Image (tube, helix red, strand yellow):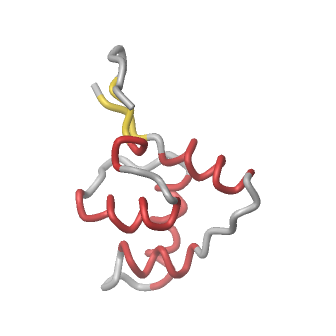
Amino acid sequence: MSRFRINEIFLAHKAAGNKVDRKKLSKKLFPDAPEISALCNIGNILNGKTVRFRAEWIEPLCSEFGCTPNELFDMEGKEVAK
C-alpha cells in the first residue's frame, strides 16, 4: 500500500521559508476548472484530503516542491531505496 506524502512535503517546504503560489499551482493541475474549484482542490491536495491522485500531477508537484516522484509516495511497510 502506498501513501501520498504531499502534506509532509508541503509543510517542510513551507518551514524552509518557501512560499507556494496556490493559484499558479492550481492552474497547472486544473487548467479547465473554475478558479474557486481549482483552489479548493489544491487545498485538499496540500492538506492530504484528496481521495484520488492523477499521474499528470506528478511533474507539476515535483517542480513546485523540488522533490522527486519517489518522495511523493511512501510504500507502507517497505523500505524505499534512496
In the image, what residue occupies the spot 39% across and 50% down?
Answer: 68
In the image, what residue occupies the spot 52% across and 73% down?
Answer: 39
Q: Is residue 45 above or below residue 18?
A: above
33 on left or right of 11: left
Residue 63, percent from left and from top: 44, 66
In the image, what residue occupies the spot 60% across and 75% down?
Answer: 21
Residue 54, percent from left and from top: 25, 57
Quadrant holding the C terminus: top left
Query: In front here: 4 or 72?
Result: 72
Q: Is residue 66 above or below residue 24?
A: above
57 on left or right of 23: left
Residue 31, percent from left and from top: 34, 83
Which residue lies most toward the front here? 82
Quadrant holding the N terminus: top left
In the image, what residue occupies the spot 31% across and 85% down?
Answer: 32
Q: Is residue 6 above or below residue 1?
A: below
40 on left or right of 16: left
Residue 73, percent from left and from top: 37, 39
39 on left or right of 59: right
Residue 62 image-quadrant placement: bottom left
Marks counted in the figure total 0
Which residue lies most toward the top here? 77
Q: Is residue 42 above or below residue 3?
A: below
